[in-house]
Each structure stands twice: as structure tokens, then as C-alpha cells.
Image (cartoon, grey):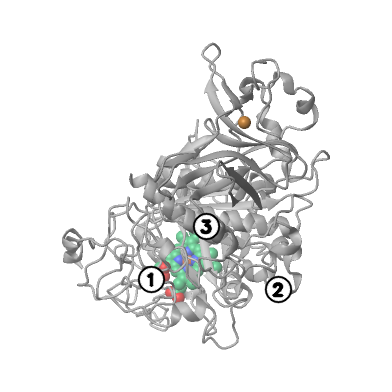
Amino acid sequence: MKTSSLRAFMAVASLSVLALSGCSAADQSTNAGDSSASVSASSEGALSISQPWIKAADNGMTAAFGTVTNNSDQPVKITGATTDISDDVQLHVTEIDPNTGTSQMKEATDGFTIEPGASHELAPGGDHIMLMNVGCSLKTGNNAEITVKLEDGSSQTFTFEVRDYQGAQEKYAPGESASATASESAEHSDQEMGDMENMDHSSMDHSAMSHSASASESALPECHSH
Amino acid sequence: MSDSRQAHDTQKLPDDSSLPRVTPAAGEQTPTGWSRRTAIAAGLGAGAGVVAGAGSAYAYASSQSPEYTPNLSTATVGFYGDKQAGIDTPPPAYGQFIAFDLAENTTKDAVARLLRILTQDATQLTAGQAPIVDQEPELAAVPANLTVTVGFGERIFDIVAPEKKPDWLKPLPAFKQIDRLDDAWNDGDLLLQLCADDRVTLAHAQRALLKGLRSFGSIRWVQEGFRRSYGSENPGETTRNLFGQIDGTINPTSADDTMNQYVWGQNLEGVQAWEPGGTSLVIRRIHMNMDTWDLSDRPAREDAVGRKLSNGAPLTGTNEHDVADLGATNELGLTVIAPYAHIRRAAPEKEVERILRRPYNYDLPVSHASGISQHGDITGGISQTGLIFCSYQADPIQQFVPIQQRLAELDMLNTWTTPIGSAVFAIPAGCREDQFIGQALFS
Ligand code: HEM
Ligand SMILES: [Cu+2]
């Protein structure tokens, strides 16, 4: 329980730092004082989120994480999510394939239900919000907004901090088709994108990770989210 | 002094840990003058805006004052403040100096993103909390007085705000008589100074912070330093370097106005900080030839510095803090403190020529080593030993360079020491909770 209060604290701390980070280059230097947006976004409605973050990606797929807490006295069910930076957002769960030991992610067809007062952790290797076909480049240190849709028809928007992250390499196994696998990581563009069918932990070339500093040719323009 | 240690044991933490934990009544000042920032309960306080920052009053602690040495699992140094921690705060046992080079096409936007995540992660690590993407979060739980201090090389200014670049921010002039600089230890676009009293805490913090910076460039060099362990020295005791010398006797202190003047550039005629709360850091990596040092006996060693090895007293005095009498002569009419003595040559000739020295030792592992290195050698023998000589001052050109120039011209210590690396950084002001380090460059 110590950890949950710590988390709650950290959410406040991180949000207050984050809040000044507008996403676009033009914004950053000017909106430092405007620090209310992401805090208020999470304090209205039944849900709040601590340590919200999204894995940096130059394009393609990525995933968003954080600990979502239901502050109301009713169960809340998250049924989906939307964002400006992707037109295909899914709720995913992750399972260990008992035969291979690799993590596989699947769509959470039933959504995520959070009991009153309970928290639901979205974490690499566990449940998460999956963003497919990201049409822009998510750079570490920027923010992205994601709106979660609730069963009662309402929605809540949260600001996620973009961070570089080398984990979250689970295979994607939509439905029953085991062949269509992919990684949450969209960092490995170029040849790896073409090779996506076979991507798994063991075939990742970690030396390729360092390239992202120089604007890689396949990187799309930076995402803008306001 | 002797009973000040026992007092720790009776020093109880406040039950309400949301209150800032401060050094008790007698003040935040150790006898040598390091300001003890408000220690705050790990996991609490940092978010509550309760950090008594560097601007708080420094009272001089008597030698009777109980020093506060908490268990390292709760020992924190406040991150926020108008000055960055890690400069006028007591030096922890381990110091890691990391110079980082930005990737070629780094934009202003990228620098802002970098500083934002660096600040956020540093805030959490120094409070004993795991940063947002920490994959070994349990290691963050022992803050151990961790400080993270950020410095800027020229390129940060060139990219973000060329008009704000201090004139002095460039490589020092060459000191031809002594320098044997290896580019492997020179310069850098960004400096991270990490200090902590626990080596695991430090390794974890370094890993966590560098992971976040990976996409922005590459590590240029890392200098790994150490001092005595936490608790090995009496509070306020001046440390010894690996030559066995008491090193740090003459230093600006927060007990009077000298820290403000020489480090923070306040109330010092002709010198100003490049920004309020900012300062500069010169890092000289200085090889110490332990083998040729072995050739000199104690009188020669004391003569070289002008101080006694036993207690650091000047050769003209009896106690460490006695003022050295540079004019005193012996029966032969020669000055007691030799013309070539380190403290004579390093003593200020102008009022502004004072610096804060906060050095760390290094002592690298050597393999298959044997023999004795010769005079002037910077390799060989059985040791790779020296000082990460860290000098903080408002203006390195006016304050540091004249001292180094005099030492280059004449200093008996040069017999055994060789500068092998040199770097200058501008240290930006500290920040508040809703800011990031260096944000003022963007306004
Ligand atoms: C390995 C290299 C060095 C060693 C072993 C060394 C050692 C010492 C020692 C033992 C003292 C006397 C005690 C004290 O006041 O701390 C001292 C004083 C001092 N050193 Fe060094 N030092 C080194 C390099 C430097 C450098 C590079 C500078 C500056 C450019 C410097 C500046 C000073 C100053 C300003 C003092 C105080 C002088 C005074 O009495 O007013 N030292 N050093
Ligand atoms: Cu997924």
C-alpha cells in the first residue's frame, strides 16, 4: 500500500512538471506557465491516472501506460480509446505463450473494468492502450493526449508523457491468427518494419536503438497534441 | 566535536514525515561551511513545495551542535531551490561526472525535451522515487543524499540562446608548462554531476538518467570519483586526498557571505553570476604520481604545500584553521612557507581570486601492473590515481584562471601532479516544481 500512495504522489509531481510541456516545438518555449491542463483533465470524472506515459515511436505502433484509478463509488468500464495521433486505438492484454515463453498481446474484447476505489495498472508486459498506425513521430519529452471511452458513453482525456523505452516488445496476436505478429516498438523502422512478421525478443537488434538521435529518414514529423 | 557524533543517535526523526526534516536548531551549517540543505523524507515533501532551498539562512553550527546523519534510506537533499544542489551542499562519498555530447542536428526543441525529462527524473531519483520508466524501480528507494547537478557546455547556448552564452564558456587557455590534456577527458555539451553516499544508488541513477538521454546524443566521458564513506569523517572534518593531505581547508563557506560571493557571484565587486543562482564548474582531471610522491619524505611533502600533514596546519601555525603567515621568515631569513609552496602560489592576489574546491579522488584499477613510474609519467607503476578537481566560481576567467596560471608557472606540487583533462561548464540556476532546469534559456 505504500507503493500506491507513492504513486499517487508521483502523479502529482510528474504532472506538474509535465504540464508545462506543450507538444509542439513552437509551444514549448512559451507556454511554461500554463500548467493546469493535464492536471484538471485527470481530476474531472471518475478516473484519474498516475505516471501516464507512452512509448516513443517514429511511426507505426506504440502503447500507452499508467495506473488508472476509479475514484467513484460505481464500477467503471473502459471500452475503448481515441487519440489524434492514431485512428486505430485498441485496449490490449498480454499473455505469456505457454509454449514459447514469449509475451503475446491480444485485444481486450471486454474492455477494462475497474471497481470503485480500485486501480488498474497499464504496464509493459500487461494491459495497455495500443496505438496502431501512428501517423507522426512521438518524441521523448513531448506529450500526447488520449481519450478513454467509458461504457456509460462519457469519456475522459489524459495527457501522456512520451518516453523512450526499450521494453514492451510483446508480439501482437490479433484474434486466433498467430502468424500476424508485431512489436509494440515502432522504433525499428527500415528493414525491421519489412521484417515485422518475424519480430520477437530474440531477433531484436538492440544496437539499432541508438539511431533515433539523428532524424531517421523514416521518422514522420513530430506529433502535435493540444 | 567529539560528542557531536553521539548526538546523532538521539536525533529522532519527526513523526510527521510530511514536514521538512531540517538540521536541528543550531543551523544548517557544518563547521567547514557546507550548507546542509533541508533533508526531506523520502517519498514525501518534494511534491509539497516545502523544500527550504539554497536561499535559506545559514547559521553557523558550533562544534557542539548535533549533526543530522539519517539512515541513507531516508537521506535526501532537496532538489528544488533557486540554486542547484550538489555545489554548496556537503559532498557525498561518491561523485560521478558525465559529459554528454548532443547529436549533430539537435534542435532547440530537442534540448527542451531533454532538460524536461532530465529534471523530472532527477526530481524523483533524488527523492528516493522511481522515475516514470524505471525498470529497476526498487533500486531507487535509497536516495542516499543523491544530488543531480546539470551543467551546460557551449553548444546548449549555441542551439538555444546564443545571446545568453557567458563569455567565459569555452576551453580554458592552455597552461603549457603543465598540461598534458587528453581529449578523452575534455569538454562536453552537457554535464551531469551525480553525487550520492551509496554506490548502488549512484549506478542506478546514472543508468536511469542516461537511458532517458540516449536518443539525444552520446556519452563523451565519465569520471568516477570518491571520498571517504558516509560516517567515516566527523561532521565538518576536512577530507584528505590520496596524497594523504588535508585538502579543502581554505574554501568559501555558507557560514559567512563567501559562498554567496565567490560561487554565486553576489556582492562581489567586478564579478557577477551569468544568471541569478547560476555559477560555473571547471573540472580538471589531475594525475597524481604516487610513485614519485613515495620518493619524497614528510618534510619535503609539507614544504611543497606549506602545511603539515598531521593536521593541515600552516607551517607557520599549530591548528588547521590558523591563518598562514606568508611573510614569516626563519633564522636564515627565508620564508617559512616556501616561494614555491602550493598555498602561497594558490593564495589570492586579487580579492576575486577565490574558488570553491569540491574534489573527488579517482583510483582506477590497473591490471598486470608493476614497477615504478618515473617523474613526469602519467602512466605506469602500480597506480592510476588522481583528483577530479572540481572548482566552482561565478567567473572562471577572473577567479580560477589567475590561480591556475600562477600554479602553472611555479608550484612544487607540479613535481607530482599533471592535468590530463579540462572542461568548463555553466551551471544554470535551480528550479521550482513547475519548471525544468535551464528553462530560463527558453524565455
Ligand atoms: C592534484 C592536484 C592538487 C592537490 C593535491 C592540491 C592540494 C592542496 C592542498 C593540500 C592544499 C592545502 C589545504 C587547503 O587549503 O585545502 C591546497 C590548497 C589550495 N589549492 Fe590545491 N591542490 C591541487 C590542485 C589545485 C589546483 C589545480 C588549484 C587551482 C587552480 C588549486 C587551488 C588551491 C587553492 C586556491 C588552495 C587554497 C590556497 C590558500 O591557502 O589560500 N589546487 N591544495
Ligand atoms: Cu498491444
Q: Is residue B17 left or right of residue A131?
A: left
Residue B287 in sight in this render: no
Residue B11 in the figure: left or right of residue B18: left
Circles 2 and 3, Cβ within 8 Å, touching? The answer is no
Q: Chain of mark 3?
A: A
Quick one: SS at disc 1? loop
At label 2, which amino acid type do we have?
A: Lys
Disc 1 beta carbon < 8 A from ligand 1?
A: no
Looking at the rendered structure, the secondary structure element under dot 2 is: helix
The one nearer the camera, A123 or B9, is A123
Mark 3 or mark 1: which is in front?
Answer: 3
**Residue topped by disc 3:** A44
Residue B322 vertical placement versus B189 (above, below) = below
Ranked by sequence position, the earlier of labels 1 and 2 is 1
Quarter of image, res A75:
top left
For the C terminus of chain A, which image quadrant?
bottom right
Label 1 CA crowd tier, 10 Å (few <14, some 14–19, many 20+): many
The image shows residue A34 at horizontal and vertical percentages of 62, 68
The amino acid on which the numbered mark 1 sits, given as a three-letter code, is: Ser
